[in-house]
Image: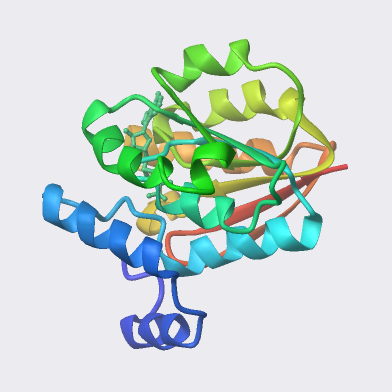
Amino acid sequence: MELINRQIEEYTESFTSNESEILMELIKASEENLEYTDMLTGRQVGRLLKFLIQLSGAQRILEIGTFTGYSAISMAEVLPEDGTLITLEMNEKYRQISKSFFEREPFNKLINQKMGNALEIIPTLSGVFDLIFLDADKLSYPTYYEMLKPKLKSGGLFVIDNVLWDGDVLRPSTEKSRAIHRLNKIVRDDMDVEQLMLPLRDGVTVVRRK
Ligand SMILES: C[S@@+](CC[C@H](N)C(=O)[O-])C[C@H]1O[C@@H](n2cnc3c(N)ncnc32)[C@H](O)[C@@H]1O
């Protein structure tokens, strides 16, 4: 399903601030090395993440699903010098691309990538986070929410991508769309949080822990 009229999508994107040079370079490297790059978070969600970090003053961030590093670099670009971004990824091929960007200054001091299954790594992470960006396997979205909620500080933000799954959540007919719809209901019914679901790109929910 076309969620947003293509021309409107192009228009809104063209009136959203441009990416930095490093992000453009990262897109190019992803396109040159991978057959599909549609998992890249993209300019609008990337900018939303940046704004949320700048407005909230978030300093300790957790990302689930690095891919080639677009959202991680976007967020790290606005982190203070003593900020930290832990990003989890299980696919070595994607890491080969993100690595050359994460090794550069100042990202080498800000980004800590952990390789492996996020479902196994999350329980080993200590402390709480100011912002958590969830963008990994959709079937596990409800499990991730339950696992990650205790790791979000009071007043912290949880940003969840692909919550509309191409519109399939309206009539969920696949395992993935059913899992995302279940997550959406869990968030809606959770009295510990306030949330705003945005029909931005493939749908983004911004959740604030009370
Ligand atoms: C939609 S992409 C992330 C896009 C990324 N945020 C960006 O800005 O380009 C989802 C990523 O999650 C990774 N992933 C999926 N399941 C995972 C798991 N259980 N543990 C760790 N990473 C996982 C995939 O390999 C993929 O790179």
206 or 14, which is in the foreground? 14
Residue 77: where, in percent of width, then height?
A: 56, 57
Q: How many labels does the image show?
A: 0
Quarter-of-image position of residue 84: top right
Residue 140: where, in percent of width, then height?
A: 46, 26
Looking at the image, residue 83 lies above or below residue 46? above
Looking at the image, residue 181 lies above or below residue 42? above
* Residue sitting farthest toward the front: 105
48 or 184, which is in the foreground? 48
Residue at 43% from the left image edge and 80% from the top image edge = 13
The chosen color scheme is: rainbow
Q: Tell me if 93 is positioned left or right of 128 in this view.
A: left
Residue 113: where, in percent of width, then height?
A: 46, 30
Q: Tell me if 131 is positioned left or right of 13 in this view.
A: right
Residue at 73% from the left image edge and 26% from the top image edge = 151
Residue 52: where, in percent of width, then height?
A: 69, 59
Residue at 59% from the left image edge and 64% from the top image edge = 48
Residue at 25% from the left image edge and 35% from the top image edge = 96
Indicate which quadrant contains ligand 1.
top left
187 or 161, which is in the foreground? 161
In what quadrant of the picture does the C terminus appear?
top right
Q: Tell me if 21 is positioned left or right of 193 in this view.
A: left
